[in-house]
């Protein structure tokens, strides 16, 4: 009985603390995001140290845009290719979704958290992807900021 009560309490805390996103919050998703960790359905975590690629989002005022994989270079630039996914932001009740589409498939992820520095999404396999906002890597010019 105590275990059931404990699980119920934790569930209520998660539901009660869930961030409600507004259309104005959508602009925060624009930019480069680096994956920090993945939390599996059973609670196990997979940490990511150094990432070879970042996710780049560009969403417009109509809540539509793209997501593209980019590879940061040591000089502060990014290697890109022509591959991207179309993205639409969808608001449903108290939830916000990223709806992706390519010529080959469609899928959705729920946005659990979005701030200027953090993005957390939940996919259909119940995996939580935790991202941190990223920028160009610049090891040239002795640490001077990249524009």
Image (cartoon, grey):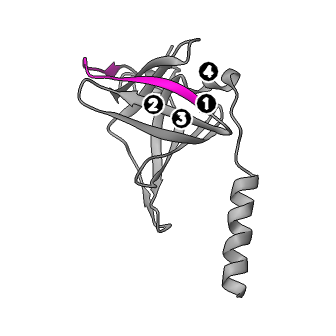
Q: Quadrant of residue 91?
A: top right
Pointer 2: what residue?
99
Q: Which mark is residue 97?
A: 3
Q: CA distance from mark 1 to mark 3?
A: 6 Å
Pointer 4: what residue?
27
Q: Position of residue 77 (x, y in %)?
A: 37, 19
Q: CA distance from mark 2 to mark 4?
A: 16 Å
- Helix or strand or loop: what does disc 4 sit on? helix
Q: CA distance from mark 3 to mark 2?
A: 6 Å
Q: Quadrant of residue 38?
A: bottom left
Contact, mark 3 vs mark 2 (Cβ under 8 Å): yes
Q: Earlier in the sequence, mark 4 or mark 3?
A: 4
Q: Is residue 89 magenta?
A: yes
Q: CA distance from mark 1 to mark 2?
A: 10 Å
- Helix or strand or loop: what does disc 2 sit on? strand
Give the class, few, some or many, for how many residues have Cα within 10 Å of label 1's Cα (few <14, many ≥20): some
Pick the residue in front: 121 or 143. Answer: 121
Pointer 1: what residue?
91
- Helix or strand or loop: what does disc 1 sit on? strand
Q: Quadrant of residue 83?
A: top left
Q: Which stretch is magenta?
A: 78-91
Q: CA distance from mark 1 to mark 4?
A: 14 Å
Q: Residue furthest front?
A: 93
Q: Residue furthest bottom?
A: 1
Q: Earlier in the sequence, mark 2 or mark 4?
A: 4
Q: Main secondary structure of the magenta part?
A: strand
Contact, mark 1 vs mark 3 (Cβ under 8 Å): yes
Contact, mark 1 vs mark 4 (Cβ under 8 Å): no
- Please tell me whether residue 103 is drawn above or below residue 4 in the rendered image: above
């Amino acid at each position: 009985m105590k275990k059931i009560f404990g699980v119920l309490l934790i569930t209520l805390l998660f539901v009660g603390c869930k961030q409600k996103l507004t259309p104005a919050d959508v602009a925060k998703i624009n930019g480069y995001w680096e994956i920090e960790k993945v939390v599996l359905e059973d609670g196990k975590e997979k940490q990511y140290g150094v990432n070879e690629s970042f996710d780049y989002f560009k969403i417009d005022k109509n809540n539509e845009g793209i997501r593209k994989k980019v590879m940061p270079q040591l000089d502060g630039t990014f290697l890109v290719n022509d591959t991207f996914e179309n993205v639409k932001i969808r608001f449903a009740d108290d939830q916000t979704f990223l709806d992706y589409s390519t010529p080959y498939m469609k899928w959705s992820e729920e946005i659990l958290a979005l701030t200027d520095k953090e993005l957390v999404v939940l996919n259909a396999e119940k995996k939580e992807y935790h991202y941190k906002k990223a920028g160009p890597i610049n090891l040239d010019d002795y640490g001077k900021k990249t524009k």
